[in-house]
Amino acid sequence: MDLKDIKAIIDLMKKNSISEFELEKQEFKIRLKRGGITPVTVEEAAPLIYAPPAAFPAALPHGLPSPAPAPAATTSETEIKSPMIGTFYRAPSPESAPYVDIGTEVGPETVVCIIEAMKVMNEIKSEVRGVVTAILVENAKAVEFGQPLFRVRPL
């Protein structure tokens, strides 16, 4: 990864109001964090442990309300989550029909959306078999890593 790619990531973070970005690829790891005076770090790969922000409720500043919990999916539903930070698109082009709608039956290899990251269109597959019961993100909106995109009821 060269300086041009890092600058492109920073521009994407500014454009989509993303405060933190982390990428690990083979022997390369980069972590960018906006705000404060925290320096940008680039280092060789090390074990990475991800804990969702909800795991640290005590870290919220006093006086700020804690975020409302997201509506829980019924226990029989599975969420398809974003594997990356980027822009969510329901269709391959603005003129095309969406990949899936509510009620669409999907299989593990079914493409359900595209996430654009660093001007690369990444097809996201369902990875589960079932019926789409909810679309949780609006078209052309920024998504975070691990953010639920769809709910699927297994068949």
Image: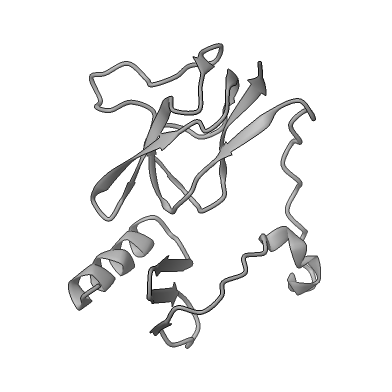
Q: Is residue 98 above or below residue 60?
A: above
How many numbered callouts?
A: 0
Q: Quadrant of residue 100?
A: top left
Whether residue 64 can be seen here:
no
Residue 106 position within the rendered picture, expressed as x and y whole percent measured from the top left: 51, 19
Q: Quadrant of residue 149?
A: top right
Name the residue nearer the viewer: 44 or 95: 44
- Of residues 121 and 46, which is closer to you in this image? 46
Percent x, y of residue 71: 74, 36
Display coloring = one colour
Residue at x-position 62% and y-position 69%:
49
Q: Is residue 120 visible?
A: yes
x and y percentages locating residue 15 in the rendered image: 33, 58
- In the rendered image, which quarter contains the N terminus? bottom left
- Residue drawn at 23 percent across, 50 percent down: 119
Q: Is residue 85 above or below residue 59?
A: above
**Rendered location of residue 54, percent (x, y):** 73, 59
Q: Residue at x 66, y 21 (%)?
A: 154
Q: Residue at x 36, y 64 (%)?
A: 14
144 sits to left or right of 141: right
Residue 4 sits in which quadrant? Answer: bottom left
Q: Quadrant of the C terminus?
A: top right
Q: Is residue 62 left or right of residue 125?
A: right
